[in-house]
């Protein structure tokens, strides 16, 4: 009898989720800030995999939470989560992951999101963290 171990099952689930996020990004359902030229040249799959790792470091696990985090990394700034207000929300031990997500959507001001957008040079960040071919 063929048995799938827990680790194998999780890897399959991760692959399916990453496929879904990549499809979302590539099929132009993403915010127009990511141009067709960028979609053609950027390694979105590797960006998504990295983003999932970072999101999980904050205790995020649901597809909704991971998707939101990864899309923020791609569209706002890969280090958006270092903005002090955002970082504080993401690390708040008194909040569940879904409460953290909700607070990001309701409690972070436009000025704080603008600050998050300038946390780092996105091109340099992705060049530094993504594997090279």
Image (cartoon, rainbow, N blue to C red):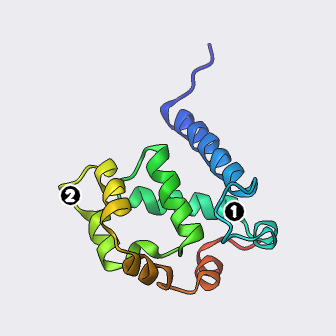
* Percent of width and height locating residue 81: 41, 71
Q: Is residue 87 left or right of residue 39?
A: left
Q: Which mark is residue 92?
A: none
The quarter of the rendered structure image containing the N terminus is top right
**Residue 103's image quarter?**
bottom left
For image coordinates 42% across by 47% down, the residue present is 61
Where, by quadrant of the figure, is residue 121 drawn? bottom right
Residue at the spot 39% in from the left edge and 81% down from the top edge: 111
Where does residue 11 sit, x and y in percent of width and height? Answer: 57, 41
Q: How many marks?
A: 2
Q: Mark 1 falls on what kind of element?
A: helix
Of 12 and 16, the residue lying toward us: 16
Residue identified by numbered label 1: 44
Is 32 positioned to the left or the right of 59 in the image? right
Left or right position of 56 against 51: left
Image-based side of 55 in relation to 92, left or right: right
**Mark 2, residues whose alpha carbon is within 10 Å: few (<14), some, or many (≥20)?**
few
- In the rendered view, tell whether residue 41 sits above or below residue 1: below
Residue nearer the viewer, 3 or 60: 60
User: Which residue is found at the position 80% from the left and 68% from the top?
Assistant: 36
Furthest-top residue in view?
1
- Position above or below: 63 against 86: above
Q: Quick one: SS at disc 2?
A: loop
Q: Which residue is mark 2?
A: 93
Residue neighbourhood size for the residue with mark 1, other residues' Cα within 10 Å, grouped as few (<14), some (14–19), many (≥20): some
Judging depth in this view, the residue of 9 and 46 nearest the camera is 46
Residue 12, position as x, y percentages in the image = 61, 37
The first of marks 2 and 1 along the sequence is 1
Which image quarter holds the C terminus?
bottom right
Reply above or below: 26 against 33. above
Q: What separation in Å lies between label 2 and label 1 (alpha carbons)?
A: 31 Å
């Amino acid at each position: 009898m063929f048995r799938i171990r827990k680790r194998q099952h999780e890897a399959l689930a991760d692959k399916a989720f990453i496929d879904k996020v990549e499809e979302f990004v590539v099929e132009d359902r993403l915010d127009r800030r990511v141009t067709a030229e960028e979609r053609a040249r950027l390694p979105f799959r590797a960006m998504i995999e990295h983003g999932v790792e970072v999101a999980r470091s904050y205790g995020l696990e649901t597809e909704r939470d991971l998707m939101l985090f990864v899309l923020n990394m791609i569209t706002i700034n890969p280090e958006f989560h270092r903005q002090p207000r955002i970082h504080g929300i993401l690390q708040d031990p008194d909040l569940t992951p879904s409460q953290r997500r909700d607070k990001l959507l309701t409690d972070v001001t436009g000025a704080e999101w603008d600050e998050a957008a300038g946390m780092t040079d996105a091109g340099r960040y992705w060049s530094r963290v993504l594997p090279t071919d």
